[in-house]
Amino acid sequence: VSAIEVARAALEAADGDAEAVAHTERSGLARFAGSEVHQPTLIENTVVTLRVVRDSRAGVATTNKVDSDGLAALARRASEAADSAPADETFPGLAPPSEPAQVEGYDERTAELGPDDQARLAAAAIEAAEIPVYGFFTSAVSELAVATTTGVSVEQRMTDATALVVAADEGRSGYAETTAWRSGDVDPAAVAREASEKAARTKGAQELEPGSYRAVLEPYAFADLLEYFSHDSFGGLGLLEERSYFSGRLGKRIFDEKISIADDSLDPRGLPKAFDFEGTPKQRVQLVEAGVARGVVWDRETAAQSKNGAASTGHALPVESRDWGPLPYALSIAPGDAESVEELAELVGDGIYITRLHYLGVLHPREGVITGMTRDGTFRIRDGKIAEPLVNLRFTVAVPDLLGEVYGLTRTAALVNSQNFYGERYPYGVLSPAVAAARFTITGVGSKPGI
Amino acid sequence: VRDLCAAAIDAATGAGAEYADARVVLKRNQLVATKNGRVDRLTDAESEGIGVRVLVGGAWGFACDRRLTSEGAREAALRACTFARAAAGNHSRQLAPLDVQTGHFRSAVERDPFEVPLAEKVEHCLRADAALAGPDILVRQAMVRAQREHKLLLSSEGTEVEQELIECGAGIDCSAAGNGVFQSRSYPSAHVGSSCQSGWEYVDGLGLEREAPRVAEQAAALLRADPCPSLVTTVVLDADQVALQVHESVGHPTELDRVYGTEASYAGTSFLKPGDLGSLRYGSEKMNITADSTTPGGLGSFAFDDEGVPAARTPVVAEGRLTGFLTSRETAARIGSGAGGSMRADGWNRMPLVRMTNLHIEPGEGTFDDLLADVDDGIYMETNKSWSIDDKRLNFQFGTQIAWEIKDGKLGRMLRDATYTGITPVFWGSLDAIAGPESWRLYGLTNCGKGQPGQSAHVSHGAAPARFRDVQVGVKA
């Protein structure tokens, strides 16, 4: 049964105005540690969420029992929820019918991968590494469909594949990953080699005096940092609640003019999406243009609350995640001119080189201050060259300060996976180049790399 | 559904599995949240299915199916065997011995939270939401939640246990903004309040509406408070922040799968080594940490874990020395100590992992005022705001929503944006006092992430306010 059939069946079970969102997943994840697959997980599931609207009162219920009895019970629970809610004059109504753009993002070959294939591709990573590896290969086919009594009926099939490797032993570790919607674009052996080669260079890591340093951030690190910044600053709810760095700054210069950031779910280099969880077509949204704050993303609810003429840009999240409001799930940072990270190191001259970040925490959302650790490949830059390895470092940076003076970005952008596969499978990521910036504040030293 | 589990195990062993277990899980969640006087979320979610875990040739495999049919059960078992057979590696995984377990368990509840009408939950939130109103308050939020998890576990060794775990929780948050400053306050904890394995009486007892005016006043006052200075000083943490400190810097590093590196690709490893057991100095002699899956009301309480191992109370740190790890049957066999008991899965479609159950710091003596009385100059910090710790769980930096100066044993001016940082064993070594049993509270959090694919665990921590000397506070960007 397809997702759209499930959504339509749920809609038929409902009494009155309603929206049904159906999500199917068939995935396999072959997780390995110490070069052995130790947690191989196969998942098959279909989940349908029904939002029933009585006048301006809305209630939501979810189930994975999609036979007629299950859907009838779903409708009863959603109706009971709606009947329990007080009237909400700000409720914007369900989405009108629309014709989302045709997007890529589905690959038959990826969809056909089964457990033997997923295990084989994990083995390819394991066999290619010269030191023990920890990570996974995963692939999935998923479907999302939205149907409403207002006439929305949209569906999309998606595939995704990721190979992720931490190569590590005593005192050394390196990281690499590749994500794509075509599994053929993911080479687990190449990922493992990149992680291994990085790890080999981290032996004998030294400590570093805390302070402000020039820095090169690989795409893995830059994407992670920007994604955390985006939760408060790039969404309409953050703007309305004044926790966004953009509050009072729209139209003003906030970053170096080399920085342009968009959210672009239609870009085939990413993990394309045609519509959001309300069935609204995805739009490309320019967030930052040549350093100037241009806009944020909206869903129907926050756009209605904004009272400034904003309209949904197609960024509604699943209903259970809407406490964050709309978020950009396809961040895309405009690349620069540098041919390589080595060229960025030359621009930096003296500084630090960061492969990856770990366990970020937002200290002050309004100022964009974020802390975290570097991990799996931190190096000193001396005389424009990537030099000796460093221990894992604690950083505390204000993102606007980091991006206030940028020396350059690489010409190519990598797709960095952002989904850690909690809940239902919904692949998304950040298209990010590497960046060289003038100020990255180190506030402490941690342990040496490695296991 | 017992027959489905049995069918899955028969299919797995018939396909060559030397061990198999099957879990059927039926889970229901309700959430009501209000924001600024309107209903923000009102959801009622259910999920059911069967998860089958097998050992074939010493290799694990796991597969699941949402269909509670014999066909779904058998197909999941066979897919799990296929995946295990294909798994790369020289597998020789062993399980610690376990006697056959049978039994039933149900959470003790006075008023089943699912018997509380949704309209009553909405009203409960709206009253608390309204009570948060005040000058400079921009965002008011209240939420209540409830969960029922009914699960049946059968194993090829003959274990058969059935459990029904019921929990609920609630919390309020508000945010104030002005002059470019943004501040938040929460009660009883940040990050979706606090939860307990209990009936609705737990939510009633929290007194959200009663506490709301104080929470709002403090949020507004923070807009005019001075920033926390940067210095090395004595720090007193409230019980909520001590609970978070225990979670991050004791709970996760003592998970034995992390010690063995099997979580290296995501959550990270541990600064601890297997050989540290019984010898490593974790903190001062005031530090006593206990893993206890028998704690009444704990979110990590059960009669049996998801491998069927009976609940137990285990000292993890005794008088500052490492005395125990959190284990599975596999990791217990590998280290040659313990019997498991910490394996938990996030529903039917995830493989069990080594997780915290309930991890407590044991109370000391005296009152909160006694902790302050012995401080000439210091800072008191309350309610977690931000948290970050490295992959080995050594270097941490935490922030709290609010703080006060301590001068001559008394609380002084309010401070905002308080942070502190340290290295785990050094920090715990600086613990010189913890308040007594009357200050000890149980906090339940529902957002502990681990594993690939990701899993969220619900865990509880008992904690009391504690005092630490020579701590770096006020980290600046």
Image (cartoon, coloured by chain):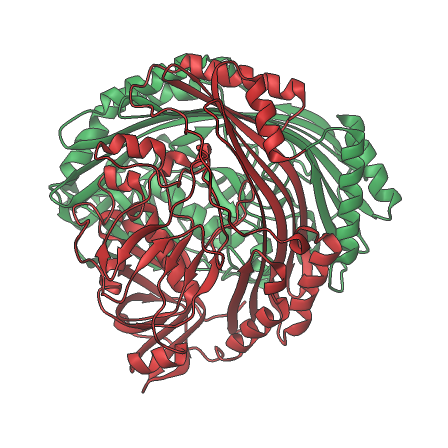
Chain colours: A red, B green
Residue at the extreme front: A99
Using residue B147 as the reference point, say whether residue B305 is left or right of it: right
| Most foreground residue, A237 or A36 | A237
Residue shown at the point (32%, 63%) measured from the top left: A395
**Residue B187 percent coordinates (x, y):** 31, 31
| Most foreground residue, A401 or B414 | A401
Residue A40 visible in image:
yes
| Most foreground residue, A381 or B425 | A381
**Residue A95 percent coordinates (x, y):** 41, 29
Above-or-below relation of B444 to B399: above
Using residue A70 as the reference point, say whether residue A352 is left or right of it: left
Residue at the extreme right: B14
Residue shown at the point (67%, 23%) measured from the top left: A67
**Residue B120 percent coordinates (x, y):** 40, 13
Residue shown at the point (26%, 48%) measured from the top left: A295
Above-or-below relation of A351 to B306: below
Quarter the N terminus of chain B occupies: top right
Residue B322 visible in image:
no
Above-or-below relation of A252 to A14: below
Quarter the C terminus of chain B occupies: bottom left
The quadrant where residue B129 appears: top left
**Residue A385 percent coordinates (x, y):** 37, 85
- Tell how many labels: 0
| Most foreground residue, A360 or B93 | A360
